[in-house]
Image (cartoon, rainbow, N blue to C red):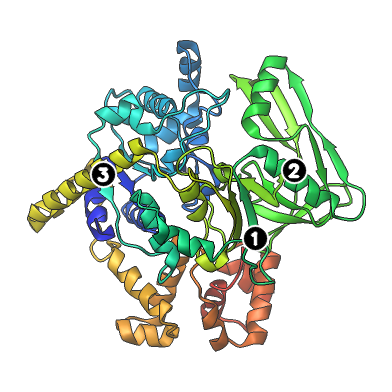
Amino acid sequence: MKQSEALEILKMGRNVYLTGPAGSGKTHLLNTYIDFLKENGVGIGVTASTGIAATHMNGVTIHSWAGIGIKDDLDEWEMDSLLQKQYLAKRFENTKVLIIDEVSMLHHYRLDLIDRVCRGFKQNELPFGGMQVILSGDFFQLPPITRGGGESSFINKSGVWQNMNLEVCYLEEQFRHKCDTLVDILNSIRQNNAGENVLVPLRTRYRKELKSHITPTKLYTHNIDIDKINEGELEGIDGPARIFEMETKGKKALVETLKKSCFAQEELRLKKGAAVMFIKNNPIKKYVNGTLGTVADFSERGLPIVKTYDGRKIEVDRESWIIDDEGKIKAELKQIPLRLAWAITVHKSQGMSLDAAEIDLSKSFVEGMGYVALSRVKSIDGLRLMGLNTIALQVNKDVLNLDTELMELSKKSVDKLQKMVEKTKKQKQKEFLESVGGSAKKGKEITLSTYDETQLLVEKKLSIEDIAKERDLTENTIINHLEKLLEGNEKLDLNYLEKDFPSDKLKKIKKAFKKSGDTKLTPVKSILGDGFSYEEIRLARLFVSW
């Protein structure tokens, strides 16, 4: 299915399972639909199963959004208490469309719990209380981790999956790893056809030295290997370590539950130069669970100052993890929300997109690990393979069968869409907008094609002036397209456009944005004064790293 076809189905208000291989444009399509809904005044819940996945759409975790936190289930008393929370009641009242991204990392029983909470707040027994729900993900990712080592299942085993009349949209176009052997490798693994056609190109990356300016993230399959590597790297840095002890209070059993669920360490040892990963979301300081960086220094208060990979410096204070009951804290722990991250597990890497990775799959213990690890890397040139075993390149047979079934269902959806006359399609889309309180606005409907056409010209390295001429649009409109494209694809390369901008002015504007700490134009204009126009500031904003 093409993105444009999936968008037409979404606009008709259908419940959708959106899937496809890495780089097929799932997040880009979701962002396009989110823009469409916002343009038409429709309330949306934008969520994902993990913090790092949520940032791709400026959303929050589904656990936080639904108010369930780390709970696996709610008894009747807990559910009743949850339904009394006014801020949640307001949220559900305003939400007509719920999006959950990276659902492969969501337990089947959690989806049923979210459905139950939605029905409770909406006072409607339809699945998710009658909201349109879009589930996005890829079952070739690893199944969710279960505390205590029990059986874990994907969301297709949930009760609500069977009852929500899902339309399957399987995207098959490829927008990532273009002109790269990695595309062929990943596709072969997905098709359970990983023979010499995969092993030959992978052998060329065996212990391959990467470009000197790139520090690869190390991906390993077991925590014990991760801990050994990280501790070894830390010991290799001269000087004493700063030690941060976990603080806890509350019932021991509840505290232990918190410890298992949050990944915070009881004793965290850090040094200047240590590679670290955030393990909690903080929208104010703009970091999420999975943000990577380096300890640049320690503040006067003795707290670590982390420089993230996008250039920001964050003083990291202790964060709290709590279990509460109607506002009363039952258990709490406080710790610096960091872990050493020269190496991370393949499981933890899901949702990330890496410039370079050193991957050891020699101890892979479940099918799919190779696919997940290799699909994190943007290009085969960024891969250093340290080891491989026979299970690494295998895929789960149940997942393979399910994938075949999903592709067939998607083809049926395409056939049904193509047989639908345009007038009927538009009428259904109009009726859906009206049912969720939206209003179709002429001339403001966002489509995939206009942004994609601009992106194709960007990939050809055309100037903004030339793109505007080619598209017969104003330069201001093209800048608007570039802003939207950056929201959906933060790795979009616009650096070549900097050469058309006076370097002295660009430097001053970047400095002003950093000083203001805001993406808005007005505060920066106030700092810079009359020598800079809003148009210049807006254009320069495209080149600022946040």
Residue located at (45% from left, 85% from top): 463
- Cα separation, mark 3 vs mark 1, equals 35 Å
- Badge 3 marks a residue whose secondary structure is helix
Look at the picture and state if 33 lies above or below 502: above
- Tag 3: residue type? Thr
Badge 1: how crowded within 10 Å, few (<14), some, or many (20+)? some
Q: Nearer the viewer, mark 1 or mark 2?
A: 2
- Badge 2 marks a residue whose secondary structure is helix
Front residue of 349/211: it is 211
Residue located at (63% from left, 81% from top): 506
278 horizontally vs 393: left or right: right
Per the rendering, the mark at residue 216 is 1
Q: Position of residue 492 (x, y in %)?
A: 48, 69
Residue at mark 3? 404
Front residue of 294/38: it is 294
Q: Is residue 430 visible?
A: no
Look at the picture and state if 287 lies above or below 460: above
Whichever of callouts 3 and 2 sits on the residue coming sooner in the sequence is: 2
Residue at mark 2? 228
Residue ranking furthest to the right: 239
